[in-house]
Image: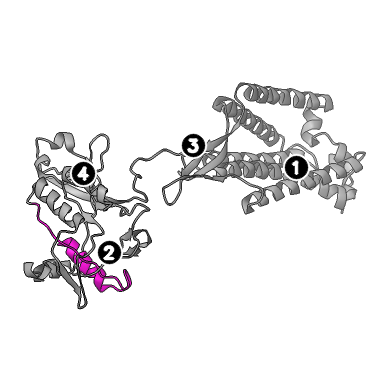
Amino acid sequence: MALVFAVDEINRNSNLLPNVTLGYSLYDNCGALVIGFRAALVLASGQEEQFLLQENCLGTPPVLGIVGDSYSTFSIATSNVLGLFRLPMVVRQNVTGLQWMASEAWTSVDVLQTPDFMPYLGGTLGIAIRRGEIAGFKDFLLGIHPSQHHNSNGNSIMVYYLDKVNFSTPIGDQVSFDENGDALPIYDVMNWLWLPDGTTKIQNIGVVKESSKDSMECTSCPEDFWSSPERDHCVPKKTEFLSYHEPLGICLTAASLLGTCICAVVLGIFTYHRSTPMASKPGGGASLKWFGAIQQRGTVIVLTSVQAAICTAWLVSSSPTPHKNTEYHHDKIVYECVVGSTIGFGVLLGYIGFLAILSFLLAFLARNLPDNFNEAKLITFSMLIFCAVWVAFVPAYVNSPGKYADAVEVFAILASSFGLLVALFGPKCYIILLRPERNTKKAIMGRATPKT
């Protein structure tokens, strides 16, 4: 009756098959192969009853297709013979799977949904023929009578090519046919649930819409590819990385270039005024009281050598490398930089942190030394900025995905570098350029004549 209703609906809708009327003949095979086989041969050989097609036309209605039996065995046997007549036959496709993926044949079988079987079959996923509410079908069933549908619509022919059929049903399902004239299947995904009270329930959890006849036999795409929207071929995955062409990359690059230019300007200022006390002063009050020039240079060389040794060991043992991350998005490749040796990366950060804390402590202790320009105060402030930036960096880096982790790292480097540059060299450049009267040894050492 569903087929009868579908034919009637198609005939009433002039947008589906204009100027074409479909007909049908119904046969009951009584569950026997021989009866259904005989009916199929009668249709194929044109030996069925004669009908008045139109007022001036008498003949046998052409048969363009046969809907097979619900039993796949009967349908296969019949289709083998109908193939000799080049007569298409619509049959049901069985879907099988692994580890209790139920085919359409037993997805809804009640005999398996018992407490004896559910410990083994609970959670089974099955494929079922698409179900849905068909508007008007209930009223149609309630109003039918056997005499109304006895070959009454077999009065026309079908001249429309199936591969051009493409429309949506009132419930939203897309109806179309492939190049072989087979309808593209739509299946409900069913899940067997074993409820706490011992009863069972089959729940619809999704829909499978296939785009081709053989789409049940899927082939995995290579690592760098992803399935197309039509699910019929593999397409390259999109790539994502921190690029110079995107706004974030442009901003970070501009900030880096700005910092480079500022460093070059500062270097030029100090080179041009290298003979002045402010440019040649080695570390302010803290250095004059505790270390001389030789001690300062030796300390810098030793500490820098230790850091260089740590970096060399890290790069030689397991250096950072680009990595294609496919975990964030299935259809996108995220290029990111992995640190290589986590131990090496941690030791390097720890050593830099140790130097920052040591510099901060020494500068803090020397902050009150008698000196009109006590550089220890500037070092203390710059180390506070440096430590605050890198303490905030760790959680932000860990929780940032993909290219944003690299952006956070670049931002931390820029922020700490700008903090050191402005805090340490900003006041010196101010005195050298705008307050030259304070750029004398007496003014720096605090022995200048006080103003009244």
In space, the residues marked 4 and 1 are separated at their CA atoms by 88 Å
Segment colored magenta: 1-29
Answer with mark 3 or mark 2, whichever residue precedes in sequence.
Answer: 2
Answer with mark 4 or mark 1, whichever residue precedes in sequence.
Answer: 4
Helix, strand or loop at disc 4? helix
Q: Residue furthest right?
A: 275
In space, the residues marked 3 and 2 are separated at their CA atoms by 37 Å
Judging depth in this view, the residue of 290 and 271 nearest the camera is 271
For disc 1, the neighbor class at 10 Å (few under 14, some 14 to 19, many from 20) is many
Residue linked to disc 1: 424
What type is the residue that disc 2 sits on? Ile
Name the residue: 35% across, 52% down.
180
Q: Are marks 3 and 2 in contact (CB under 8 Å)?
A: no
Residue linked to disc 2: 171
For disc 3, the neighbor class at 10 Å (few under 14, some 14 to 19, many from 20) is few
What is the image's colouring? Answer: one colour
Answer with mark 1 or mark 3, whichever residue precedes in sequence.
Answer: 3
In the rendered image, which quarter contains the N terminus?
Answer: bottom left
Determine if residue 447 is in view.
no
Helix, strand or loop at disc 1? helix
Determine which of the numbered discs, if any, sits on residue 223 in the image: 3
Judging depth in this view, the residue of 381 and 4 nearest the camera is 4
Give the percent coordinates (x, y) of residue 66.
21, 55
Residue linked to disc 4: 76
